Amino acid sequence: MGDAEAGKKIFTQKMCSGNAVEKGGKHKTGPNLRGLYGQKTGQAPGFSYSNASKNKGVIWGEETLMEYLENPKKYIPGTKMIFAGLKKKSEREDLIHYLKWATTS
């Protein structure tokens, strides 16, 4: 599922200004995504989440990210996330593949 190199390009072009992935990286307009997989929504220490994100209560994984990345505001109504989403399934698959590698290795 997905191509990590293509996913890195999507991350750099569409999300990098808002999120970091490196260990110890600072939060930006969005949280550092390190440790994203297996984490509940709205739980990255030190980031100020919307109540909607804190209360969503899902665990991030491939399936939840696939749905979220298509339309973040639909998946979590009331989120502060400014990223509009990715309509193309292949782009979401590539980004998820990259995020899995980048946030856990």
Image: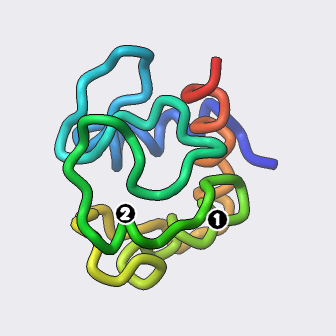
* Residue 9: x %, y % from top left: 47, 36
* Residue 104: x %, y % from top left: 63, 25
Q: Dot 1: what SS?
A: helix
Residue at 34%, 46% in the rendered image = 15
* Residue 10: x %, y % from top left: 46, 45
Q: Earlier in the sequence, mark 1 or mark 2?
A: 2
* Residue 32: x %, y % from top left: 35, 34
Quarter that holds the C terminus: top right
> Amino acid type of disc 2?
Lys
Near-viewer residue (86 or 35): 35
Q: Is residue 2 left or right of residue 20?
A: right
Total numbered labels: 2
| The quarter of the displayed image where residue 13 is located | top left
Q: Is residue 51 above or below residue 100?
A: below
Residue ID for mark 2: 54
Near-viewer residue (72 or 85): 72
| The quarter of the displayed image where residue 33 is located | top left
Near-viewer residue (64 or 95): 64
Q: Dot 2: what SS?
A: helix
Labelled disc at residue 64? 1
| The quarter of the displayed image where residue 60 is located | bottom right
Q: Could you give the CA–CA distance between mark 1 and mark 2, rounded to whole angstroms?
A: 15 Å
> Amino acid type of disc 1?
Thr
Near-viewer residue (19 or 91): 19
Nearer the viewer's eye, disc 1 or disc 2? 2
Residue at 43%, 28% in the rendered image = 21
Labelled disc at residue 49? none
